[in-house]
Image (cartoon, rainbow, N blue to C red):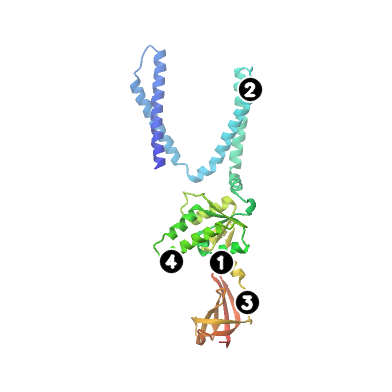
């Protein structure tokens, strides 16, 4: 809505500008010519010319895409700054040489603006591709809290990140974008009971983490990208601008970030890495919880949630049994242990 209002005001300003210029030109002609022209028709022509100019400018702006603007804007900024610097240097030199002739003043000013302008054009067109790294360097905020890390919604709802921070294994600045906080609030306002409970739990965890600043600092940033609708894409762009890592539990976000070269800290991978190593022929004790898919199989779980499939354990559901490990299978979802029944303990 704001853009439309600005466009209408721009068109009206162009029309008014055309009328003023037409009136001025006709007035000058009437002052120097014995034939006096009527101002009203020429003012109408000037207004139409201003309207045409406004339409042409608006039409040309429609061809400027977001990608094109991001590429040419650093070059334009460099050219403008260089020409302004050339003009400022010439004015400074002329302030020490007030007796210079007007022709010398114009020549000096034009020469310096030309030299500085050419320098700006060269740097803008040849070095514009490297401005993104400069922007990232400006945005990068290390400070006393070390390297920054961007947190996504799944990690906040999961809640284990608070315990990891308390243990001291995670430090640095933890960045929570405003759009992630908004997504969390939408989940907390969901009509579904379970989804609403998860959202509120995530907000409670985030509030608790903000009060603990010994090794980590939770920062809410306002950076947003209205042209990007997908939250995962916004997180990736934010992480690139801050030169930060992404903390997530999202499998798809993890894969996309790896493809785009953004470092990822996956809490599920950390949990799997912290599980104790189990070797074949090792003996353990487990409680059979339910029947397995295959004949004579029983399924139990270790304290860390690892599934144990016991061959011969179907008949011992609800009892503790001794198991000899036969193999270990590591998958993207976690680890599975296969074993055979050695005996019943209780």
The residue to which callout 3 is attached is 278
Q: Residue at x 57, y 80 (%)?
A: 338
**How far across and down, in percent of the image, does residue 49 sit?**
39, 29
The residue to which callout 2 is attached is 95
Secondary element at tag 4: helix
Residue depth check, mark 4 versus mark 3: number of the one nearer the observer: 4
Quarter of the rendering occupied by the N terminus: top left
Q: Residue at x 35, y 20 (%)?
A: 39
Tag 1 or tag 4, which sits nearer the N-term?
4
Q: Residue at x 46, y 61 (%)?
A: 200
- For label 4, count other residues whose C-alpha is less than 10 Å away and answer few (under 14), some (14-19) or many (20+): few
The residue to which callout 1 is attached is 268
Q: Is residue 204 left or right of residue 191?
A: right
Disc 4 versus disc 3: distance between alpha carbons? 35 Å
Q: Residue at x 38, y 32 (%)?
A: 12
**How far across and down, in percent of the image, does residue 292 sit?**
50, 81
Residue found at the far front of this picture: 211
The residue to which callout 4 is attached is 194
**How far across and down, in percent of the image, does residue 73 sit?**
54, 40
Question: Compared with residue 33, is residue 216 higher up or lower down, i.e. above or below?
Answer: below
């Amino acid at each position: 809505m704001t853009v439309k209002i600005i466009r209408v005001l721009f068109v009206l300003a162009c029309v008014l500008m055309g009328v003023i210029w037409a009136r001025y030109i006709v007035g000058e002609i009437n002052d120097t010519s014995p034939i006096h022209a009527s101002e009203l028709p020429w003012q109408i022509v000037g207004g139409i010319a201003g309207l045409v100019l406004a339409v042409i400018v608006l039409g040309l702006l429609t061809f400027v895409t977001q990608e094109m603007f991001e590429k040419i804007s650093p070059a334009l900024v460099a050219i403008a700054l260089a020409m302004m610097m050339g003009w400022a240097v010439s004015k400074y030199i002329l302030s020490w040489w007030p007796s210079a002739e007007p022709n010398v003043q114009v020549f000096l000013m034009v020469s310096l603006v030309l030299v500085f302008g050419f320098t700006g054009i060269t740097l803008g067109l040849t070095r514009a591709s490297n401005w993104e790294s400069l922007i990232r360097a400006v945005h990068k905020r290390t400070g006393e809290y070390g390297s920054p890390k961007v947190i996504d919604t799944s990690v906040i709802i999961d809640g284990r990140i608070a315990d990891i921070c308390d243990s001291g294994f995670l430090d640095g600045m933890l960045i929570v974008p405003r759009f992630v906080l908004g997504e969390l609030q939408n989940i907390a306002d969901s009509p579904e009971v379970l989804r609403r409970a998860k959202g509120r739990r995530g907000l409670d965890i985030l509030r608790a983490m903000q009060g603990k600043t010994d090794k980590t600092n939770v920062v809410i940033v306002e950076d947003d990208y209205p042209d990007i609708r997908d939250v995962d894409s916004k997180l990736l762009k934010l992480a690139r601008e801050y030169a930060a890592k992404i903390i997530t539990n999202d499998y798809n976000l993890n894969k996309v970030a790896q493809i785009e070269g953004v470092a990822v800290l996956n809490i599920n991978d950390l949990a799997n890495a912290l599980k104790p190593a189990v070797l074949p022929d090792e003996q353990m004790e487990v409680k059979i919880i339910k029947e397995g898919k295959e004949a004579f199989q029983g399924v139990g779980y270790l304290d860390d949630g690892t599934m144990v499939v016991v061959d011969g354990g179907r008949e011992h559901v609800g009892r503790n049994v001794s198991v000899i490990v036969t193999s270990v299978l590591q998958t993207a979802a976690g680890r599975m242990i296969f074993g055979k029944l050695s005996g019943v303990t209780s």
